[in-house]
Amino acid sequence: MRRYWLSIIIAVLAVSGIGSYYAFARQNYLPEYKLETIQGDPKEGEDVTLIGSYYGDMRSEPLEVNTAGSEYGGLNTNFRTRLTGVPWIYRQPDIHQLIKDHKSFMRGKGNMNGFYRDEEWVIYSDVSIKNKRSDTPLAALKLTLLHEATDKVSTFQQTYELPKEPSHIFVEDVQRIDDEIFILVKKIYNVYKPIDVEYNIVVLDLSSGKQLRNVKLENWSSPAKDIEMQVSTILTDRPSAPTETFLFNVSEMKINKNTGNAQRIGEKYYSYSYRTSLLTELSDMGWQSADDGGRVISLQHDYFYFAEYGLDHITLSRYGLKTKEQERAYASISAEQLGVDEIKSVQISSNRVYLLFNQAGVPGAAVLDLTNGEVLFTGRTAEIGDEQETEQEMKENLHLLNLEIVEKIKD
Protein backbone atom coordinates (compact mmCIF):
# COMPACT_ATOMS: atom_id res chain seq x y z
CA MET A 1 0.00 0.00 0.00
CA ARG A 2 2.87 2.32 0.87
CA ARG A 3 4.44 1.63 -2.54
CA TYR A 4 1.08 2.43 -4.18
CA TRP A 5 0.79 5.84 -2.49
CA LEU A 6 4.42 6.65 -3.27
CA SER A 7 3.73 6.04 -6.98
CA ILE A 8 0.69 8.34 -6.83
CA ILE A 9 2.71 11.12 -5.16
CA ILE A 10 5.50 10.83 -7.75
CA ALA A 11 2.95 10.98 -10.59
CA VAL A 12 1.26 14.06 -9.12
CA LEU A 13 4.60 15.84 -8.69
CA ALA A 14 5.58 15.01 -12.26
CA VAL A 15 2.34 16.35 -13.69
CA SER A 16 2.62 19.45 -11.49
CA GLY A 17 6.21 20.04 -12.62
CA ILE A 18 5.32 19.73 -16.29
CA GLY A 19 2.37 22.08 -15.82
CA SER A 20 4.55 24.63 -14.02
CA TYR A 21 7.16 24.38 -16.77
CA TYR A 22 4.65 25.10 -19.52
CA ALA A 23 3.01 27.86 -17.48
CA PHE A 24 6.40 29.49 -16.94
CA ALA A 25 7.30 29.03 -20.60
CA ARG A 26 4.03 30.62 -21.66
CA GLN A 27 4.61 33.51 -19.26
CA ASN A 28 8.02 34.11 -20.85
CA TYR A 29 6.81 33.65 -24.41
CA LEU A 30 7.57 36.61 -26.64
CA PRO A 31 5.70 36.70 -29.97
CA GLU A 32 7.60 37.20 -33.21
CA TYR A 33 6.66 39.89 -35.71
CA LYS A 34 7.66 41.19 -39.12
CA LEU A 35 6.86 44.20 -41.28
CA GLU A 36 4.59 42.61 -43.87
CA THR A 37 4.15 44.20 -47.30
CA ILE A 38 0.65 45.51 -48.06
CA GLN A 39 1.50 47.08 -51.40
CA GLY A 40 4.51 48.18 -53.43
CA ASP A 41 8.06 46.89 -53.73
CA PRO A 42 9.19 44.92 -50.62
CA LYS A 43 12.81 46.01 -51.28
CA GLU A 44 11.80 49.62 -50.56
CA GLY A 45 10.86 48.56 -47.03
CA GLU A 46 14.08 46.68 -46.26
CA ASP A 47 15.77 49.71 -44.68
CA VAL A 48 12.87 50.42 -42.31
CA THR A 49 12.95 49.36 -38.65
CA LEU A 50 10.09 50.05 -36.22
CA ILE A 51 11.35 50.55 -32.67
CA GLY A 52 9.53 50.46 -29.36
CA SER A 53 8.40 47.97 -26.73
CA TYR A 54 6.27 44.90 -26.22
CA TYR A 55 4.07 45.03 -23.12
CA GLY A 56 2.97 41.65 -21.82
CA ASP A 57 2.67 39.73 -18.53
CA MET A 58 3.29 42.86 -16.45
CA ARG A 59 6.62 43.67 -18.11
CA SER A 60 8.11 45.63 -20.97
CA GLU A 61 10.63 44.34 -23.50
CA PRO A 62 12.51 46.54 -26.03
CA LEU A 63 11.50 45.48 -29.54
CA GLU A 64 12.62 46.12 -33.11
CA VAL A 65 10.59 44.98 -36.13
CA ASN A 66 11.54 45.02 -39.82
CA THR A 67 10.81 43.07 -42.98
CA ALA A 68 13.17 40.29 -41.88
CA GLY A 69 11.56 39.71 -38.49
CA SER A 70 11.85 41.01 -34.93
CA GLU A 71 14.42 41.25 -32.16
CA TYR A 72 13.92 41.74 -28.43
CA GLY A 73 16.10 43.50 -25.89
CA GLY A 74 18.87 44.52 -28.27
CA LEU A 75 20.06 40.92 -28.72
CA ASN A 76 23.03 40.49 -31.08
CA THR A 77 23.77 44.20 -30.86
CA ASN A 78 27.04 45.03 -32.60
CA PHE A 79 29.92 45.08 -30.10
CA ARG A 80 31.28 48.40 -31.35
CA THR A 81 27.83 49.91 -30.80
CA ARG A 82 27.78 48.74 -27.17
CA LEU A 83 31.26 50.10 -26.53
CA THR A 84 30.68 53.55 -27.98
CA GLY A 85 27.10 53.92 -26.80
CA VAL A 86 26.28 55.75 -30.06
CA PRO A 87 24.49 53.29 -32.37
CA TRP A 88 23.12 56.13 -34.50
CA ILE A 89 26.69 56.97 -35.58
CA TYR A 90 27.53 53.37 -36.43
CA ARG A 91 24.26 52.91 -38.31
CA GLN A 92 24.95 55.80 -40.66
CA PRO A 93 25.51 53.86 -43.90
CA ASP A 94 28.45 55.94 -45.11
CA ILE A 95 30.21 55.71 -41.74
CA HIS A 96 29.45 51.99 -41.55
CA GLN A 97 30.92 51.57 -45.03
CA LEU A 98 34.08 53.43 -43.98
CA ILE A 99 34.50 51.13 -40.97
CA LYS A 100 34.11 48.09 -43.22
CA ASP A 101 36.54 49.40 -45.85
CA HIS A 102 39.16 51.05 -43.61
CA LYS A 103 38.96 49.63 -40.10
CA SER A 104 42.48 50.73 -39.12
CA PHE A 105 42.02 54.29 -40.37
CA MET A 106 38.71 54.65 -38.52
CA ARG A 107 40.09 53.59 -35.15
CA GLY A 108 39.67 56.32 -32.51
CA LYS A 109 37.66 58.65 -34.75
CA GLY A 110 34.28 59.45 -33.21
CA ASN A 111 33.03 62.75 -34.66
CA MET A 112 30.53 61.79 -37.37
CA ASN A 113 30.61 65.25 -38.97
CA GLY A 114 34.41 65.16 -39.24
CA PHE A 115 34.43 62.66 -42.14
CA TYR A 116 34.62 63.29 -45.89
CA ARG A 117 34.89 60.76 -48.72
CA ASP A 118 35.04 61.03 -52.50
CA GLU A 119 36.45 58.82 -55.26
CA GLU A 120 40.05 59.59 -54.25
CA TRP A 121 40.23 60.66 -50.62
CA VAL A 122 38.96 59.86 -47.15
CA ILE A 123 39.46 62.82 -44.82
CA TYR A 124 38.89 63.19 -41.09
CA SER A 125 39.23 66.33 -39.00
CA ASP A 126 38.73 67.12 -35.34
CA VAL A 127 39.45 70.12 -33.15
CA SER A 128 40.37 70.74 -29.52
CA ILE A 129 41.40 73.67 -27.31
CA LYS A 130 45.01 74.27 -26.28
CA ASN A 131 46.24 76.67 -23.58
CA LYS A 132 43.04 76.34 -21.60
CA ARG A 133 42.32 78.93 -18.91
CA SER A 134 44.92 81.30 -20.34
CA ASP A 135 44.86 84.67 -22.10
CA THR A 136 45.94 83.01 -25.36
CA PRO A 137 43.64 80.05 -26.03
CA LEU A 138 44.30 78.17 -29.28
CA ALA A 139 42.22 75.92 -31.49
CA ALA A 140 44.20 72.81 -32.45
CA LEU A 141 42.90 71.43 -35.73
CA LYS A 142 43.96 67.88 -36.61
CA LEU A 143 43.63 66.58 -40.16
CA THR A 144 44.09 62.96 -41.30
CA LEU A 145 43.98 62.02 -44.99
CA LEU A 146 43.81 58.60 -46.62
CA HIS A 147 44.53 58.28 -50.33
CA GLU A 148 42.43 55.23 -51.21
CA ALA A 149 44.37 54.16 -54.32
CA THR A 150 47.70 53.93 -52.46
CA ASP A 151 46.52 53.48 -48.83
CA LYS A 152 48.90 56.30 -47.89
CA VAL A 153 47.89 58.15 -44.69
CA SER A 154 49.00 61.73 -43.97
CA THR A 155 48.44 63.67 -40.75
CA PHE A 156 48.64 67.44 -40.27
CA GLN A 157 47.95 69.75 -37.36
CA GLN A 158 47.36 73.49 -37.41
CA THR A 159 46.64 75.90 -34.57
CA TYR A 160 45.05 79.31 -34.65
CA GLU A 161 44.26 81.92 -32.03
CA LEU A 162 40.83 82.28 -30.48
CA PRO A 163 39.46 85.65 -29.29
CA LYS A 164 38.43 83.95 -26.04
CA GLU A 165 38.13 80.41 -24.74
CA PRO A 166 34.90 78.68 -25.81
CA SER A 167 33.11 76.23 -23.57
CA HIS A 168 32.72 73.84 -26.53
CA ILE A 169 34.29 73.55 -29.97
CA PHE A 170 33.33 71.14 -32.78
CA VAL A 171 34.05 70.30 -36.40
CA GLU A 172 30.62 70.58 -38.08
CA ASP A 173 31.56 69.69 -41.66
CA VAL A 174 34.53 68.78 -43.87
CA GLN A 175 34.65 69.24 -47.65
CA ARG A 176 37.24 69.13 -50.44
CA ILE A 177 37.02 71.39 -53.47
CA ASP A 178 39.88 70.97 -55.94
CA ASP A 179 43.11 71.16 -53.89
CA GLU A 180 41.62 72.83 -50.84
CA ILE A 181 40.03 71.35 -47.71
CA PHE A 182 37.26 73.32 -46.02
CA ILE A 183 36.56 72.72 -42.32
CA LEU A 184 33.49 74.28 -40.71
CA VAL A 185 34.16 74.91 -37.01
CA LYS A 186 31.49 75.75 -34.43
CA LYS A 187 32.38 77.49 -31.16
CA ILE A 188 29.99 77.88 -28.24
CA TYR A 189 31.07 80.58 -25.79
CA ASN A 190 27.99 80.46 -23.59
CA VAL A 191 25.57 77.54 -23.28
CA TYR A 192 23.18 79.59 -21.16
CA LYS A 193 20.86 82.32 -22.37
CA PRO A 194 21.72 84.31 -24.34
CA ILE A 195 23.52 81.57 -26.26
CA ASP A 196 26.73 82.83 -27.88
CA VAL A 197 27.70 80.77 -30.95
CA GLU A 198 30.28 81.52 -33.65
CA TYR A 199 31.14 79.75 -36.90
CA ASN A 200 34.30 79.95 -38.97
CA ILE A 201 35.71 78.06 -41.95
CA VAL A 202 39.36 77.05 -41.93
CA VAL A 203 40.78 76.35 -45.39
CA LEU A 204 43.83 74.07 -45.68
CA ASP A 205 46.03 73.02 -48.58
CA LEU A 206 45.40 69.40 -49.56
CA SER A 207 49.04 68.45 -50.17
CA SER A 208 50.79 70.29 -47.33
CA GLY A 209 48.09 70.81 -44.71
CA LYS A 210 49.10 74.46 -44.51
CA GLN A 211 46.40 76.93 -43.45
CA LEU A 212 45.43 79.14 -46.38
CA ARG A 213 42.73 81.28 -44.75
CA ASN A 214 40.31 81.46 -41.85
CA VAL A 215 36.90 82.90 -42.69
CA LYS A 216 34.66 84.11 -39.87
CA LEU A 217 31.00 83.80 -40.79
CA GLU A 218 28.24 86.22 -39.89
CA ASN A 219 27.36 86.42 -36.22
CA TRP A 220 23.59 86.85 -36.00
CA SER A 221 22.51 88.80 -32.95
CA SER A 222 19.77 91.15 -31.76
CA PRO A 223 20.16 94.41 -29.79
CA ALA A 224 16.90 93.71 -27.95
CA LYS A 225 17.39 92.08 -24.54
CA ASP A 226 14.27 89.93 -24.86
CA ILE A 227 15.21 88.60 -28.31
CA GLU A 228 17.59 85.70 -28.85
CA MET A 229 18.88 84.49 -32.21
CA GLN A 230 19.26 80.71 -32.36
CA VAL A 231 21.53 79.52 -35.18
CA SER A 232 22.05 75.96 -36.41
CA THR A 233 23.46 74.30 -39.51
CA ILE A 234 21.60 72.03 -41.93
CA LEU A 235 23.88 69.47 -43.57
CA THR A 236 23.20 66.60 -45.96
CA ASP A 237 22.02 63.33 -44.41
CA ARG A 238 25.30 61.68 -45.43
CA PRO A 239 27.99 63.16 -43.15
CA SER A 240 30.87 62.16 -45.43
CA ALA A 241 29.20 63.03 -48.76
CA PRO A 242 30.78 65.68 -51.02
CA THR A 243 28.78 68.90 -51.36
CA GLU A 244 29.57 72.53 -52.04
CA THR A 245 26.69 74.00 -50.03
CA PHE A 246 25.24 73.88 -46.54
CA LEU A 247 22.46 75.86 -44.86
CA PHE A 248 21.97 78.00 -41.77
CA ASN A 249 18.68 78.09 -39.91
CA VAL A 250 18.33 81.34 -37.94
CA SER A 251 15.37 81.53 -35.55
CA GLU A 252 14.34 84.75 -33.81
CA MET A 253 13.12 83.82 -30.33
CA LYS A 254 11.25 86.11 -27.93
CA ILE A 255 12.17 85.39 -24.31
CA ASN A 256 9.58 85.67 -21.55
CA LYS A 257 11.35 87.51 -18.71
CA ASN A 258 9.22 85.88 -16.03
CA THR A 259 9.39 82.24 -17.11
CA GLY A 260 12.47 82.21 -19.34
CA ASN A 261 10.48 80.38 -22.02
CA ALA A 262 11.21 81.16 -25.67
CA GLN A 263 8.71 81.58 -28.51
CA ARG A 264 9.74 81.62 -32.17
CA ILE A 265 8.60 84.85 -33.82
CA GLY A 266 10.66 84.67 -36.99
CA GLU A 267 12.78 82.28 -39.01
CA LYS A 268 15.18 82.59 -41.94
CA TYR A 269 17.33 80.22 -43.95
CA TYR A 270 20.68 81.01 -45.58
CA SER A 271 22.83 78.98 -47.97
CA TYR A 272 26.61 79.13 -47.88
CA SER A 273 28.79 78.13 -50.83
CA TYR A 274 32.26 76.78 -50.04
CA ARG A 275 33.38 77.47 -53.59
CA THR A 276 32.27 81.12 -53.80
CA SER A 277 32.22 82.03 -50.07
CA LEU A 278 28.80 83.61 -50.65
CA LEU A 279 26.13 83.63 -47.93
CA THR A 280 22.67 83.95 -49.51
CA GLU A 281 19.30 84.33 -47.84
CA LEU A 282 16.63 81.99 -49.17
CA SER A 283 13.89 84.50 -49.81
CA ASP A 284 10.23 84.18 -48.84
CA MET A 285 10.23 80.55 -47.79
CA GLY A 286 6.81 80.80 -46.14
CA TRP A 287 7.08 77.38 -44.54
CA GLN A 288 5.11 77.21 -41.35
CA SER A 289 3.49 74.14 -39.81
CA ALA A 290 0.20 74.12 -37.98
CA ASP A 291 0.36 73.96 -34.20
CA ASP A 292 -0.98 70.40 -34.13
CA GLY A 293 1.34 69.09 -36.86
CA GLY A 294 5.00 68.49 -37.43
CA ARG A 295 7.68 69.41 -39.92
CA VAL A 296 10.83 67.81 -41.24
CA ILE A 297 13.57 69.53 -43.25
CA SER A 298 16.33 67.93 -45.29
CA LEU A 299 19.15 69.03 -47.58
CA GLN A 300 19.49 66.62 -50.51
CA HIS A 301 22.01 67.51 -53.21
CA ASP A 302 20.83 70.78 -54.80
CA TYR A 303 17.42 70.86 -53.12
CA PHE A 304 16.21 71.90 -49.68
CA TYR A 305 13.14 69.82 -48.81
CA PHE A 306 10.39 70.59 -46.33
CA ALA A 307 7.69 68.13 -45.22
CA GLU A 308 4.77 69.28 -43.09
CA TYR A 309 2.40 66.68 -41.75
CA GLY A 310 -0.53 66.00 -39.46
CA LEU A 311 -2.42 62.88 -38.48
CA ASP A 312 -4.35 62.93 -41.76
CA HIS A 313 -1.88 64.24 -44.38
CA ILE A 314 1.66 64.99 -45.52
CA THR A 315 2.67 67.82 -47.87
CA LEU A 316 6.08 68.18 -49.56
CA SER A 317 7.73 71.43 -50.66
CA ARG A 318 11.23 72.19 -51.94
CA TYR A 319 13.62 75.00 -52.78
CA GLY A 320 16.18 74.70 -55.59
CA LEU A 321 19.51 76.06 -54.38
CA LYS A 322 20.74 76.52 -57.95
CA THR A 323 17.49 77.67 -59.54
CA LYS A 324 16.46 79.85 -56.53
CA GLU A 325 12.89 78.66 -57.14
CA GLN A 326 10.43 77.37 -54.57
CA GLU A 327 7.89 74.63 -55.30
CA ARG A 328 5.24 74.86 -52.64
CA ALA A 329 3.19 71.66 -52.07
CA TYR A 330 4.57 69.90 -55.15
CA ALA A 331 3.23 66.64 -53.69
CA SER A 332 0.56 65.87 -51.11
CA ILE A 333 -1.00 62.65 -49.88
CA SER A 334 -3.66 61.95 -47.28
CA ALA A 335 -3.86 59.18 -44.69
CA GLU A 336 -6.99 57.98 -46.49
CA GLN A 337 -5.08 57.66 -49.77
CA LEU A 338 -2.46 55.59 -47.95
CA GLY A 339 -5.20 53.44 -46.44
CA VAL A 340 -4.19 54.23 -42.85
CA ASP A 341 -5.81 55.88 -39.84
CA GLU A 342 -3.01 58.17 -38.63
CA ILE A 343 0.39 59.43 -39.76
CA LYS A 344 2.54 59.47 -36.61
CA SER A 345 5.99 60.65 -37.75
CA VAL A 346 8.03 61.43 -40.87
CA GLN A 347 11.70 61.14 -41.89
CA ILE A 348 13.55 62.10 -45.08
CA SER A 349 16.62 60.15 -46.18
CA SER A 350 18.35 59.28 -49.46
CA ASN A 351 15.67 60.56 -51.81
CA ARG A 352 12.92 58.83 -49.84
CA VAL A 353 10.21 59.91 -47.38
CA TYR A 354 9.55 57.43 -44.58
CA LEU A 355 6.26 57.46 -42.65
CA LEU A 356 5.33 55.73 -39.41
CA PHE A 357 1.58 55.15 -39.35
CA ASN A 358 -1.16 53.54 -37.31
CA GLN A 359 -3.83 51.37 -38.91
CA ALA A 360 -6.56 49.90 -36.71
CA GLY A 361 -4.30 50.20 -33.68
CA VAL A 362 -1.35 48.39 -35.31
CA PRO A 363 1.84 50.25 -36.40
CA GLY A 364 3.21 50.19 -39.93
CA ALA A 365 5.42 52.13 -42.35
CA ALA A 366 5.21 53.69 -45.79
CA VAL A 367 7.92 54.82 -48.21
CA LEU A 368 7.42 57.66 -50.72
CA ASP A 369 9.58 58.89 -53.59
CA LEU A 370 10.88 62.28 -52.44
CA THR A 371 10.92 63.72 -55.95
CA ASN A 372 7.20 63.25 -56.69
CA GLY A 373 5.46 61.79 -53.61
CA GLU A 374 4.72 58.44 -55.29
CA VAL A 375 3.96 55.63 -52.81
CA LEU A 376 6.64 52.96 -53.22
CA PHE A 377 5.85 50.72 -50.25
CA THR A 378 3.40 50.28 -47.38
CA GLY A 379 3.77 47.60 -44.73
CA ARG A 380 2.01 46.67 -41.50
CA THR A 381 3.32 44.82 -38.45
CA ALA A 382 2.10 41.21 -38.46
CA GLU A 383 2.68 38.35 -36.03
CA ILE A 384 4.38 35.23 -37.34
CA GLY A 385 4.62 31.75 -35.85
CA ASP A 386 2.17 29.12 -34.63
CA GLU A 387 1.11 30.76 -31.36
CA GLN A 388 -0.51 34.07 -32.16
CA GLU A 389 -2.15 36.79 -30.11
CA THR A 390 -5.64 37.99 -30.72
CA GLU A 391 -6.06 41.28 -32.59
CA GLN A 392 -6.96 42.99 -29.31
CA GLU A 393 -3.88 41.61 -27.50
CA MET A 394 -1.68 42.82 -30.32
CA LYS A 395 -3.13 46.33 -30.09
CA GLU A 396 -2.61 46.41 -26.32
CA ASN A 397 0.88 44.89 -26.24
CA LEU A 398 2.60 46.30 -29.33
CA HIS A 399 4.00 49.82 -28.85
CA LEU A 400 6.28 50.69 -31.78
CA LEU A 401 6.56 54.46 -31.56
CA ASN A 402 9.74 55.25 -33.50
CA LEU A 403 11.08 54.77 -36.99
CA GLU A 404 14.73 54.10 -37.82
CA ILE A 405 16.27 53.92 -41.28
CA VAL A 406 19.22 51.53 -41.49
CA GLU A 407 20.47 51.33 -45.05
CA LYS A 408 22.41 48.33 -46.29
CA ILE A 409 26.07 48.80 -47.18
CA LYS A 410 28.09 47.31 -50.03
CA ASP A 411 29.64 43.87 -49.53
Image (spheres, rainbow, N blue to C red):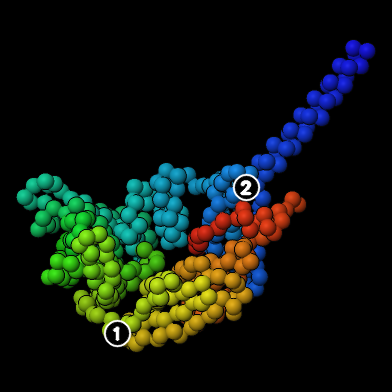
Q: Residue at x 37, y 51 (%)?
A: 106
Residue wearing tag 1: 284
Residue 82 falls in image quadrant: top left
Q: Amino acid at mark 1?
A: Asp
Looking at the image, the residue that sits furthest to the front is: 258
Residue 350 in sight from this viewpoint: no
* Disc 2 to disc 1, C-alpha distance: 51 Å
Q: Position of residue 140 (x, y in %)?
A: 18, 53
* Residue type, numbered disc 2: Gly
Q: Residue at x 40, y 72 (%)?
A: 291
Image position, residue 11 (x, y; %) = 85, 25
The answer to whether residue 24 is visible is yes
**Disc 1 crowd, CA 10 A, few/some/many (<14, 14-19, 20+):** few
Viewer-proximal residue among 115 and 102: 115
Q: Is residue 91 left or right of residue 281?
A: right
Residue occupying image coordinates x 25% and y 57%? 170
Q: Which residue is mark 2?
A: 56
Q: For label 2, count other residues whose C-alpha is less than 10 Å away and answer few (under 14), some (14-19) or many (20+).
A: some
- On screen, residue 104 versus residue 215, left or right, reads right
Secondary structure type for disc 1: loop
In this view, 22 is above or below 77:
above
SS of the residue under disc 2: strand
